[in-house]
Image (cartoon, grey):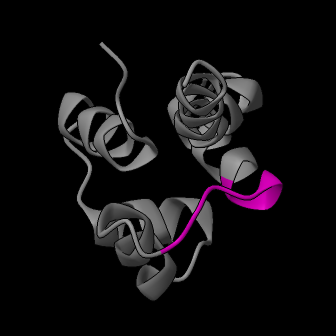
């Protein structure tokens, strides 16, 4: 099942027992931006993906793919109608 970038971000925070404030401190991403990602108000940009990948030791593409996947699913469902 597909997770939104926000859900995936929350999963990694929980898994590594890191609060949003701690993530902000570690990554250098402003806390308001971290909260915006968690609240689904902000999208994953290349820079944000880099911060997420660096802190969680993942690939940048993981975060970018999560951001782009819902749009691709929507395009497919629109094309099939």
Residue drawn at x 36%, y 50% is 6
Does residue 32 show up magenta in the picture? no
Q: Quadrant of residue 43 in the image?
A: bottom right
Q: Position of residue 42 (x, y in %)?
A: 52, 72
Q: Is residue 80 left or right of residue 12?
A: right
What is the span of residues highlighted in magenta in the rendered image? 42-48
Q: Quadrant of residue 17 in the image?
A: top left
Does residue 47 show up magenta in the picture? yes
* Residue reaching furthest to the right: 46
Q: Is residue 70 left or right of residue 44?
A: left
Task: Pick the residue in front: 25 or 74.
Answer: 74
Q: Is residue 50 left or right of residue 57?
A: right
Q: Position of residue 29 (x, y in %)?
A: 59, 72
Q: Position of residue 49 (x, y in %)?
A: 69, 47
Residue drawn at x 34%, y 29% is 3
Q: Is residue 9 left or right of residue 44?
A: left
Say above or below: 63 vs 43: above
Say above or below: 77 vs 34: above
Residue drawn at x 43%, y 87% is 32
* Residue reaching furthest to the front: 81
Task: Pick the residue in front: 5 or 11.
Answer: 5
For the N terminus, the image quarter is: top left
Q: Quadrant of residue 4 in the image?
A: top left
């Amino acid at each position: 099942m597909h997770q939104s970038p926000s859900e995936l971000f929350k999963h990694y925070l929980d898994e590594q027992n890191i609060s949003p404030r701690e993530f902000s401190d570690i990554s250098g991403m402003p806390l308001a931006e971290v909260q915006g990602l968690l609240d689904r108000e902000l999208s994953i940009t290349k820079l944000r993906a880099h911060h997420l990948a660096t802190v969680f030791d993942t690939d940048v593409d993981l975060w970018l793919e999560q951001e782009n996947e819902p749009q691709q699913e929507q395009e497919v469902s629109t094309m099939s109608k």
